[in-house]
Amino acid sequence: MTTEIKKGLDANAYVPLKEGETYKPYVPAEVNMAEFTFKAVGLGILFGVIFGAANAYLGLRAGLTISTSIPVAVMAVAVFKILSKFGIGSTILETNIAQTTGSASSSLASGVIFTLPALFMWGVAPDLLQMTILAMSGGVIGILFMIPLRKFLIEREHGKLPYPEGTACAEVLVANEAGGNKAKYIFYGMGAAALLKTLTSWIKVIPDYAAVKIPFLKKGVVGVDLSAALFGVGYILGPRIAWVMVGGGLLSAIIIIPAIAYWGDTQTTPFFPETVKLISEMSTGEIWSRYVRYIGAGAVATAGIITLIKSVPVMIESFTKGAKNIVKQVDEETHTPKADIAKEPRTHQDLPIKVVFFGILAVILMLTFVPGVFGAVGGIDTRLIAAICVAVFAFFFVTVAARIVGLVGVTSNPTSGMTIAALLGTATIFLAMGWTDTSGKAATLIVGCVVAIAASISGDTSQDLKSGYLLGATPRKQQMAELIGVLTSATFVCLSVLLLAETFGFGSKELPAPQATLMKLVIDGVLEQNLPWVLVAIGVGIAIVCELVKVPSLPFAVGVYLPLSTMTPILIGGLIRHWVESKTKKDDVKESRREKGILLGSGFVGGEGLLGVAIAGMAFVEGRKPDGIGTGWIGSDVMAMILGAISFSLLVVWFVKLLKKRDEA
């Protein structure tokens, strides 16, 4: 006899439970249905590879990534509906396993692209095997450290920690049980973005950039990248953050760069860090590269540290509670008879604590005894110290991140600040031991890489476990799916990064790799102490002023650091979201437009990112970038930019029409 499944989430899904009350999941614990199946895991692996590669491209270009839980969930629903027409059925718990497996790659990509590109900039580029081992190590540690925290953070803190993305994903899956075809918007977005990327970067019949010089302002230029992915990110972020980011870009483009240009006219010698050209001889792009980039990096580093400092009370509380509950969980499992553990409802079953312990121990031993994982630095003793740094920092920041994302969501997880803190701690230890050469820098960065991945994946894992808790999934099966997602997507994410490095290079206009450049700056600052500190100090001042006037310092600093052209399409996307949602007073229509836009925007990220990686792969095989047809057929550069702007505008118009089409009354 089975228990009837409800039509929606229980009323207690959003509020704290009263004394003695238990949450009743969508699928009751006594109902046994298909969950951890080959088709669910296989589909998750496929979507994980797709969005992992796309997020790697986006992060290297714009310094941020998007959460892919909801897009993967919606796409899984669509595929399972197609399979049902051929007699292959599926359940909501299988869909949940597919999204759990597939979403792991995005967090993996974040940690990799935030750190490892710095190795390429130092000239000690890692190979695919080394990168894959590091990615797998960080992912596995992050998931395993999270497992003992689940009962406390997800079950006992239910209603107190909302876990916004996890709750939203559960709502999407339950809503899809009632029907609908939302996945088409993701595929529409992927197709449109891939088409625009083909025109701008493959056959190159239109430019990927448009710019206007500002009259009477020396070296003043306002530009826009004709990027569907960046437009989609802007819609997902919304207008407020988009305005803040573009504000930072405007500060660089129309104030800092012209100020440097005017001042440079009076200089008769090159100004450090430039050693050859005079400022008066430089283009706008060269001034940005040689000077503004350091100002922006100083601002981003300071904003990241400020964000971390502001989170210290929550971090201390989170770590203290998390550590106590890990000890409690170990004690309970150690002293509970196996028969009682076996009787525990499936919705409360985690992977055994011995799996957690031996898994983490295996990763630490591998990092210690496998030569080359930390680069060329030292012997076993050096690698052991580095591995201990990984374990200590990862344990601390995983317990912190898992609780912070429960309060504010994955997008507000201060991963950059945590990584900077890990780098500062490790670099200080290495400095005391005299490991200050390039191999020492590389080992320091690698510690930060593993910690960044661990902190990032713990946030994703906790959101997925929240979805599972609301739906009635089996936690140990979700934890297995997370591990499989990490192990299967790691190679493809790292391969994408290698292909992009080979084709475009990091620190280039196409792929500025802002976060990795920041990590490089931090390590250079501690170990070399040879940076343009005047420029860095200006950036520090900008971040502090932002905090004093209550402007979010981190997104503003990212805007200062990146070229304005990168921020402009993000602003357009944010403004479009505000406009289409403000044009209706009906809450259901507003929600429909918001949801369709986020799915379309996610499709834009996926389509452009995948084609970007595909172009890099072709260039790697052929040994050169695609030449394309070129824009000479249009005539002048001005006419080419106008045509590019028109093409981008048509994409935006199509986007808006699709959002407003067939709105529910």
Image (spheres, helix red, strand yellow):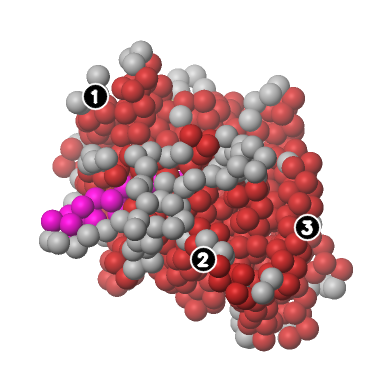
Report the residue marked by disc 1: 663
Amino acid on which the number 2 mark rests in the picture? Arg
Amino acid on which the number 3 mark rests in the picture? Lys
Tell me the distance, in whole angstroms, between the alpha carbons under discs 3 and 2: 21 Å
Secondary structure, mark 3, is helix
Left or right: 642 in relation to 355:
left
Tell me the distance, in whole angstroms, between the alpha carbons under discs 2 and 1: 40 Å
x, y (%) of residue 378? Answer: 74, 82
x, y (%) of residue 637? Answer: 28, 36
Residue at 52%, 22% in the rendered image: 217
Look at the numbered discs 2 and 1 and tell me whether their residues touch, using CB distance below 8 Å.
Answer: no
Amino acid on which the number 1 mark rests in the picture? Asp
Magenta-highlighted residues: 66-85
Residue 476, disc: 2
x, y (%) of residue 84? Answer: 18, 57
* Vertical comparison of 310 with 546: above or below: below
Report the quarter where the N terminus lies.
Answer: bottom left
Residue 554 in sight in this render: no
Residue 339 in sight in this render: yes
Tell me the distance, in whole angstroms, between the alpha carbons under discs 1 and 3: 50 Å
Secondary structure, mark 2, is helix
Look at the numbered discs 3 and 2 and tell me whether their residues touch, using CB distance below 8 Å.
Answer: no
Residue 213, disc: none
* Vertical comparison of 438 with 265: above or below: below
Q: Earlier in the sequence, mark 2 or mark 1?
A: 2
Secondary structure, mark 1, is loop
Q: Earlier in the sequence, mark 3 or mark 2?
A: 3
Q: Earlier in the sequence, mark 1 or mark 3?
A: 3
Residue at 32%, 70% in the rendered image: 38
Mark 1 is surrounded, within 10 Å at the Cα level, by few (under 14), some (14 to 19) or many (20 or more) other residues, namely few
Residue at 29%, 72% in the rendered image: 621
Report the residue marked by disc 3: 324
